[in-house]
Image (cartoon, grey):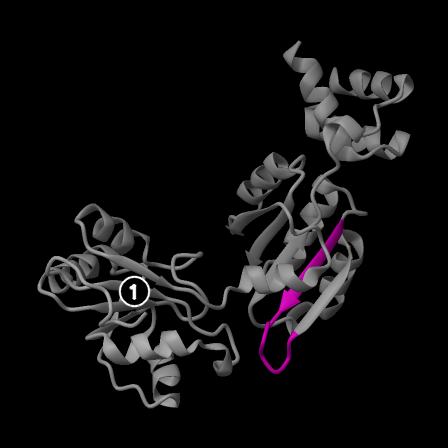
């Protein structure tokens, strides 16, 4: 299917085009044909997209669409589409809208009856999942966690009992802090993977426990650069989780009478050897009764 093979009622077509996440050879022939035939390429960063287009000799005009101008640019693109011009939406890398701009444009185009066509291809989260060695039948994509520690901790606490494989995008600046918090809240022994610079020259996939990956991140420090995908094995299902023994529950309950739940769980974990997140859930559950 190309930019000329869909019939419509007069409007142009919005193509959502996946582009390489690193290796330029990963682009599909259909994507190249579409990028050549549309009247305009809406790009997150026109300079970045120029590298791809120039590599394949594509001269289609570019138009910026990023998080800071998305609302205003969406109106202009919709007007062009209504005039019969076809547009290819691309992000800097991978599939548009996946932790990238474009949702507003696609949603409004759908609402206004403009055809929206996917041109599938690379996606960093799927590429990482395919080589991680973690369960791939059920997974949960969380995108980027909050940058601030308190908000990030709150989100991770909410995910601590999620049984599906968890997938995140993360910044090299925050990967060490994120792994440390995951050790505290998920359990240091939980299996995880950090995939870095996928399809690029320095592609690496680090596998291990959260404790091992946290130690690796602490050692590497500022040497960790590039795009990161963080995958974490899901929690054990509740029906299979070991129940707290009576003594551990008693200690947790006594500490909770004098301390906030998180501090009580942390101290109880040190005393009993039980997992902090399990003790925390027990304390919260007792407070609700």
Q: Is residue 243 above or below residue 286?
A: below
Q: Is residue 144 visible?
A: no
Q: Is residue 216 above or below residue 145?
A: below
Residue 193 belongs to magenta span = yes
Screen quadrant of the C terminus = top right
Q: Which picture quadrant has residue 228?
A: bottom right
The residues colored magenta run: 191-203
The one of 176 and 131 positioned closer to us in this rendering: 131
User: Residue drawn 34% across and 82% down?
Assistant: 50
Q: Is residue 146 visible?
A: yes
Left or right: 107 as drawn, with respect to 199: left
Query: Residue 104 placed where, x, y %?
Result: 28, 52
Q: Is residue 199 above or below residue 157?
A: below
Left or right: 195 as drawn, with respect to 84: right
User: Residue drawn 18% across and 50% down?
Assistant: 113
Q: Which picture quadrant has residue 207?
A: bottom right
Query: Residue 84 placed where, x, y %?
Result: 12, 66
Query: Residue 73 placed where, x, y %?
Result: 20, 61
Left or right: 54 as drawn, with respect to 62: right
User: Residue drawn 83% across and 24% down?
Assistant: 243
Q: Secondary structure at mark 1?
A: strand
Query: Residue 214 placed where, x, y %?
Result: 74, 57
Screen quadrant of the N terminus = bottom left
**Residue that label 1 marks:** 15
Count residues near mark 1 (Cα–Cα under 10 Å), then give few for <14, some for 14-19, many for 20+: many
User: Residue drawn 51% across and 48% down?
Assistant: 146
């Amino acid at each position: 299917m190309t930019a000329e093979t869909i019939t419509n009622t007069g409007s142009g077509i919005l193509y959502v085009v996946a582009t390489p996440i690193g290796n330029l050879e990963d682009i599909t022939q259909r994507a190249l044909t579409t990028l050549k035939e549309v009247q305009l390429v809406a790009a997150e960063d026109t300079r970045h997209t120029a590298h791809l287009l120039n590599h394949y000799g594509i001269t289609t005009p570019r138009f910026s669409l990023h998080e800071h101008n998305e609302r205003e640019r969406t109106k202009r693109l919709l007007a062009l589409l209504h005039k019969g011009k076809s547009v290819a939406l691309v992000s800097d890398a991978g599939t548009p809208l996946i932790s990238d701009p474009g949702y507003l444009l696609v949603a409004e185009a759908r609402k206004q009856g403009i055809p929206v066509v996917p041109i599938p291809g690379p996606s960093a989260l799927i590429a990482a999942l395919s080589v991680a060695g973690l369960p791939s039948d059920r997974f949960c994509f969380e995108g980027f966690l909050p940058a601030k520690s308190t908000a990030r901790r709150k989100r991770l606490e909410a995910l601590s009992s999620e049984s599906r494989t968890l997938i995140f995008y993360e910044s090299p600046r925050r990967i060490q802090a994120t792994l440390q918090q995951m050790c505290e809240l998920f359990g240091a022994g939980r299996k995880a993977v950090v995939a870095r610079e996928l399809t690029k020259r320095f592609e690496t996939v680090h596998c291990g426990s959260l404790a091992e990956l946290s130690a690796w991140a602490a050692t590497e420090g500022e040497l960790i650069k590039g795009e990161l995908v963080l995958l974490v094995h899901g929690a054990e299902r509740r029906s299979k989780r070991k129940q707290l023994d009576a003594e551990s529950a008693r200690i947790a309950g006594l500490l909770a009478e004098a301390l906030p739940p998180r501090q009580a769980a942390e101290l109880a974990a040190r005393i009993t050897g039980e997992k902090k997140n399990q003790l925390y859930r027990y304390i919260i559950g007792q407070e609700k009764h």
